[in-house]
Image (cartoon, rainbow, N blue to C red):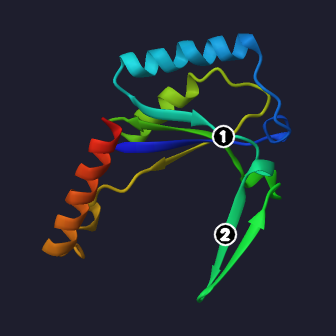
Amino acid sequence: MRFMIIVKADQDSEAGVMPSEELLAAMMKYNEELAKAGVMLAGEGLHPSSRGARVRFEGSKRTVIDGPLTESKELVAGFWIWQAGSMQEAIEWVKKAPFDGGTEVEIRQIFETEDFDEVMTPELREKEERLRRELEQRQA
C-alpha cells in the first residue's frame, strides 16, 4: 500500500520562513530512518502559495487564481510518498515525525491500478502500463 503524507501549511511556511538548522537535522535523520526501513519513496517541501496558482474548472471555462492562496489551513507545505503495510503502520511512522507547535499531517492512501479493476478495460490497462514504463524511464 502506498500513502501520501500531507504536511499542512501554517503561517510560517506560508511566510516563507525556513526551518531551523535543528529541525532540518531532525527531519534529515527521520527521512534516513524512513528510507532505511524501505518506507519512504519520495518527499519534498513546497514553496509558499504566494509562488503558486490554482486553476478552477467550470465546464469549458478555466480560471487561473494566482497566489497567495487563502485558507492556509487547507494548503500543503510538503509531502511524502510512503509504502507501508497498512494505514496503522503509516500512522505509527507519522507519530515519530519531529514536528511540534500544532503541525497537522494528513495521511491518504493512494489508489493502485487494481483498485479500478471493475472499470479498467484491457485497452486502458495497456495505456496505464505504457505510461508507467515511460515515467520510470524518465526518472532513471
**Residue 33 shows up from this direction:** yes
- The quarter in which the C terminus is drawn is top left
Quadrant of the image occupied by residue 54: bottom right
Q: Do the residues under discs 2 and 1 have CB atoms within 8 angstroms?
A: no
Q: Which residue is mark 1?
A: 46
Neighbourhood count class around disc 2 (C-alpha, 10 Å): few under 14, some 14–19, many 20 upward? few
Which badge, 2 or 1, is on the more N-terminal residue? 1
Number of numbered discs on residues:
2
Neighbourhood count class around disc 1 (C-alpha, 10 Å): few under 14, some 14–19, many 20 upward? some
Query: Where residue 67 sits: x, y (%)?
Result: 80, 57
Query: Where residue 109 sits: x, y (%)?
Result: 43, 50
Q: Pick out the residue farthest to the bottom.
A: 59
State the residue in front, 90 or 18. 18
Residue 55, numbered circle: 2
Q: CA distance from mark 2 to mark 1?
A: 18 Å
Question: Residue at image x 67%, y 17%?
Answer: 24
Residue 77, numbered circle: none
Q: Quick one: SS at disc 1? A: loop
State left or right for residue 107 relative to residue 132: right
Query: Does 23 sit above or below residue 109?
Result: above
Question: Residue at image x 36%, y 39%?
Answer: 86
Question: Residue at image x 66%, y 69%?
Answer: 55
Question: Residue at image x 74%, y 25%?
Answer: 100
Q: Amino acid at mark 1?
A: Leu
